[in-house]
Image (spheres, grey):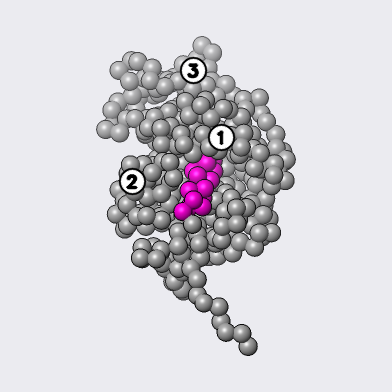
Amino acid sequence: MNAPAQFRPVPLAIVGGGAAGMFAAVVAAGRGLGCLVVERKARLGAKVLMTANGRCNFTKDLPAERMLDDLGEPVASFVRPALTACPPARILGGFHALGVRTKRMADGRLFPASEKAADIVHAFGDRLRDREVPLLFNTPVTGIAATPKGFLLSTKSFTLSARKVLVATGGLSFPKTGSVGDGQNFARDLGHRIEPCRAGLVGFEAHVPRVARFEEAAARVRVDGAVVCDYRGEVEFERWGVTGAAVYNCQRWVARHLTKGERFTLELQQGHERLNLESPTARPLKEAIVTIGGVARADVDPETMMSRKVPGLYFAGEVLDIDGPTGGYNLSIAFATARLAVASILKTL
């Protein structure tokens, strides 16, 4: 019988099997970087399967500079290196390479041709299977400890040794998908600052005159009478308040920029009809499309996605305090930051 092989840590452990984690694992496998994915739920991409009502708007057909303009500050400056290296055209090409047929909407949003998010998740899963990338499901990581030679990842059942770690655990919205704040807790325990987490891209609670849906309406935010953001798109009046893409984007602006509780007016207009809502309350974080807040951008190098506090520890996606409007932006920055993290890791090994 041959003697047992000497124990070796895995080159890269990816914590989280969502959008950023799956993308990172596919990139790593394609570049010959040994990795494994540790996921607390029973399958990959639980939140991806929910995006765009299960249709998965995975990016938008825009030049990187236009997407950065739409993201706005303070997010754009941080994700510029990642999105410049992996713009929407490259993301689209990557999905074509995975065998995913796609379709473009009139406004540039890109979907799988079937409009089924499962096609995206299955494409990732098939590639990881073909590359023999280990996937550990039903395995919540309980802690990450830095060591002189890398990291130890603890679970209830075992401890895993890794040379590098990429944390891609997502935010705190839709916790049933596994986004429960694990990554933010790991980062805090390792000395990183965590920006307060709050709802992004969610509706407002308000009294509305009737239940209705407008495909193309205007939604604006006014502060002291001045328009500070202005979006057009879907607006829906529900029994509990207002929702729809244009409203979501206004809510994101409010959550990002009115952090001290400043008063504002949400102005909704369809034709000659106009409704003004005074400082409506956002729906809870658990219902939000994205989380605003998370690992502080200042604690992560935007050129590499590596922690400025703990060498060898990387972050990607919504675990960071980065977010964008609705319409493919958030998956784009998850994919781009994941790719940049893996490319940076490859340069160090």
- Residue projecting furthest to the bottom: 1
Q: Is residue 284 visible?
A: no
**Residue located beneath label 2 in the image:** 299
Please state the extent of the stretch shown in magenta in the rendering.
328-348
Cα–Cα gap, marks 1 and 2: 24 Å
Question: Which image quadrant: the N terminus?
Answer: bottom right
> Could you say where residue 163 lies in the image, as x and y percent from the top left?
45, 62
User: What is the number of the mark on residue 87?
Assistant: 1
Q: Mainly helix, strand or loop, the magenta region?
A: helix
Answer few, some or many: residues within 10 Å of disc 2's Cα (few below 14, many 20 plus, some between 14 and 19). Answer: some
Identify the element where label 1 is drawn. Answer: loop
**Residue 334 falls within the magenta-colored stretch:** yes
Residue beneath the point at 64% across and 63% down: 132
- What amino acid is labelled 1 in the image? Pro
Q: Give the label, 2 or 3, closer to the camera.
A: 2
Answer few, some or many: residues within 10 Å of disc 3's Cα (few below 14, many 20 plus, some between 14 and 19). Answer: some
**Residue located beneath label 3 in the image:** 269
Q: Is residue 231 left or right of residue 261?
A: right
Q: Is residue 216 visible?
A: yes
> Could you say where residue 61 lies in the image, as x and y percent from the top left?
61, 29
Q: Where is 15 relative to 47, above or below?
A: below
Q: Which is more toward the observer, 209 or 60?
A: 60
Q: Which tag, 1 or 2, sits closer to the chain's start?
A: 1
- What amino acid is labelled 2 in the image? Asp
Identify the element where label 2 is drawn. Answer: helix
